[in-house]
Amino acid sequence: MTLLIPLVFIMTAHVYADLDSFSDHVIESEQNPKPETPPESSDEQSSNSGFGDFLALVFGILWLYDNTYLYYADYPYQAGGYIRRPVDDPFIHTKVYADDAKYYWFSTSLSGFYLNGIGGGSWVSFSGNAHKFIGPYADVYVITDARKVQIGTRLGIHFSLLQFNPFNASFYIQWQFWNGALSRHGVTTGLELRLYPLKPLTFRLKAGSQMFERFSIGELELEMGIMIKAWECFVGYRSWTLNNETFSSYDGAYLGVRRYF
């Protein structure tokens, strides 16, 4: 059943889909990059720097407290909470972890998607923390308009910023390769928020940018899911905005399954 999801999107990809048109818009963006904003004055830079240093200090303290002493359950909504904390032992003056404490979490997903004006296809993702706050983040996706194919590969890291029940935020950065109708490479970076407010509901927000040599694509994902033990069924909305003078936008729905471990 899972494999039918991307197949359905691929079979319907010829409707309102045109990879050639997307390629033309990318090339146009490379030839007409978005104008640069004028630099700030020295006074504005000094004021922004001082306030930025203060925020960085506060965030650093919160980050150390939040990410140093924690471990994980096997999946969201497992009894005891997904993100867990050790107990302070006043007799030995240290923190005591559970015997089965797990310092990593991972999830992998498969989804079918459609981007209006480009095409449809399948998307495979793998992410998580290999140890408490940092880990791999990889994506492979295939888009087709029933005539041509575009393959995207992203390899990078996932870095947790805040981790609480029922909310956690992370930063990601990936090296991206395009092959097929277009051959390009660049960097993808952004923020990802995951919320587990009420069993069995899950929500995810991802906002970032795909940055290539002479153009960029803003990306946004809004997602809602339902947990069934370690499995999650989800549906979402994805938008790509080509940042040039014409601001070409491509959006569409996706749905799939995710497994936590």
Image (tube, rainbow, N blue to C red):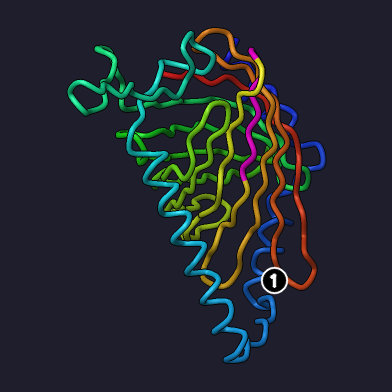
State the residue position of label 1.
28
Look at label 1 and name its amino acid: Glu
Residue 203 is inside the magenta segment: yes
Q: Nearer the viewer, residue 59 or 159?
A: 59
In the image, 110 versus 92, the foreground residue is 92
Residue situated in front as seen by the camera: 198 or 88: 88
Find the magenta span and give its range.
199-206
**Residue under the image location 80 percent in, 68 percent down:** 246
Q: Is residue 238 above or below residue 86?
A: below
Q: Quarter of the image containing the N terminus?
A: top right
Q: Position of residue 59 (x, y in %)?
A: 47, 54
* Quadrant housing the C terminus: top left
Q: Residue at x 62, y 25 (%)?
A: 6
Give the camera-side residue of 222 and 14. Answer: 222
Residue 67 in percent (x, y) is at 38, 39
Q: Is any part of residue 7 visible from this angle?
A: no
Q: What residue do we see at 62% from left, 85% from top?
A: 44
- Decide whether the magenta segment is chiefly helix, strand or loop: strand
Q: Is residue 60 above or below residue 92?
A: below
Farthest bottom residue in view: 42
Q: Is residue 219 magenta?
A: no
Residue sitting at x 64%, y 68%: 27
- Label 1 Cα crowd, 10 Å radius (few <14 / some 14-19 / many 20+): some
Q: Is residue 76 visible?
A: yes
Q: How many numbered tags mark residues here?
A: 1
Give percent across and percent down for residue 141.
54, 38
Q: Is residue 116 left or right of residue 92?
A: right
Above/below status of 79 relative to 206: above
Q: Is residue 97 left or right of residue 55?
A: left
Q: Residue furthest front?
A: 91
